Amino acid sequence: MSLHYIAYSLGALTAGGGTMGYVKTGSVPSIAAGMTVGILYGLGGYRIQTRQPYGVELALLASIILGGSSIPRALRLRKTVPTILSLVSLFGLLTFGRAWNAL
């Protein structure tokens, strides 16, 4: 699967998850974080697709931000949503980290 499709998928997943968090609980931080990370993934995917510089780096940054916020919560709370977000971030870190290393 192409890197831009992965970035778009992760962007949609995080933006959708943030929106669902807002709808379900009214959490403004959920929608703000979900949309911010989703936009970073989407912008990274677009830049990868159009062969512009810094696409992989933007997607990697989105994974770092997502992991930095979700992994500590997953370890502390042991709840489903932070654990899933942690797995998404780890997948992004591995995928885009390998792509960045290959540049």
Image (spheres, rainbow, N blue to C red):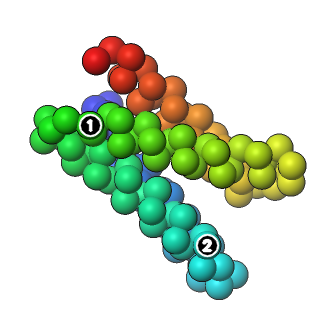
Q: CA distance from mark 2 to mark 1?
A: 27 Å
Q: Quadrant of residue 101?
A: top left
Q: Amino acid at mark 2?
A: Pro
Q: Secondary structure at mark 2?
A: helix
Tag of residue 29: 2
Residue drawn 86% across the image and 49% down it:
76
Image check: 89 left or right of 12? right
Using the image, determine if residue 97 lies above or below residue 3: above
The spot of residue 15 in percent (x, y) is 46, 64
Q: Earlier in the sequence, mark 2 or mark 1?
A: 2
Which residue is pictured at 66% across the width and 51% down the height? 69
Tally of numbered tags: 2
- The local secondary structure at tag 1 comes to loop
Residue depicted at x 69% and y 81%: 25
Q: Are marks 2 and 1 in contact (CB under 8 Å)?
A: no
Residue 61 in view: yes
Q: Judge the density around disc 1: few (<14), some (14-19), many (≥20) Cα neighbours within 10 Å.
A: some
Point out which mark residue 54 bears. Answer: 1
Q: Position of residue 71 (x, y in %)?
A: 71, 44
